Image (cartoon, grey):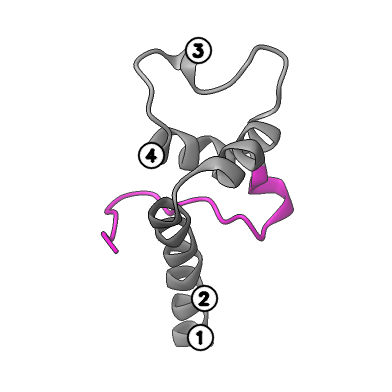
C-alpha cells in the first residue's frame, strides 16, 4: 500500500469525514478525465462512492480496504 505524504487521508469510519473519504476514493480509483465524470449532478459523494464500490474490481476493493487497515494499524500503534 502506498503511504501518502501530506495531510491525513479522511477516514470512512468518522461520520463528519464520510463525504471527503468518498470523494478521495473516487478521485483515486474511479477512471475520470473531467470532474463531472466522478459523480452525477445532485448525487452525494458518498452515494456515488457506494455505487462505485459495488461495481469496481476486487483489486480496487482490496486497495480501499488496505487503506482502512492502515488506519487501524496506526490507531493500535498510537494507543
- Residue at 53 percent of width and 50 percent of height: 10
- Camera-side mark, 1 or 3: 3
Mark 2 secondary-structure assignment: helix
Q: Is residue 19 magenta?
A: no
Q: Is residue 7 left or right of residue 17?
A: left
Q: Decide whether the magenta segment is chiefly helix, strand or loop.
A: loop
Closer to viewer: mark 2 or mark 3: 3
* Placement of 36 over or under 38, stated as above or below: above
* CB contact under 8 Å: marks 1 and 3: no
Q: Earlier in the sequence, mark 4 or mark 3?
A: 4
Question: Could you say which quadrant of the image residue 20 lies in?
Answer: top right
User: Does residue 9 appear left or right of residue 12 in this picture?
Assistant: left
CA distance for labels 1 and 3: 38 Å
Task: Classify mark 4: helix, strand or loop.
Answer: helix
Label located before the other in sequence (2 or 4): 4
Q: Are marks 1 and 2 in contact (CB under 8 Å)?
A: yes
From the viewer's side, name the closer residue of 26 and 72.
26
- Which corner quadrant holds the N terminus? bottom left
- Mark 3 sits on what residue? 36
Among the two numbered marks 1 and 3 on one chain, the one whose residue lies closer to the N terminus:
3
Q: Which disc is residue 76 wearing?
A: 1
- Residue behind mark 4: 28
Q: Which residue is mark 2?
A: 72
Q: Looking at the image, which is closer to me, 5 or 55?
A: 55
The answer for how far apart the CA atoms under marks 1 and 2 are is: 6 Å
- The magenta segment: 1-18
Amino acid at each position: 500500500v502506498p503511504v501518502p505524504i501530506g495531510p491525513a487521508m479522511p477516514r470512512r469510519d468518522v461520520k463528519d469525514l464520510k463525504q471527503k473519504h468518498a470523494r478521495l476514493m473516487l478521485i483515486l480509483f474511479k477512471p475520470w478525465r473531467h470532474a463531472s465524470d466522478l459523480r452525477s449532478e445532485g448525487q452525494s459523494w458518498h452515494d456515488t462512492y457506494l455505487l462505485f464500490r459495488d461495481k469496481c474490481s476486487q483489486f480496487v476493493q482490496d486497495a480501499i480496504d488496505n487503506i482502512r487497515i492502515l488506519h487501524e494499524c496506526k490507531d493500535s500503534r498510537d494507543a
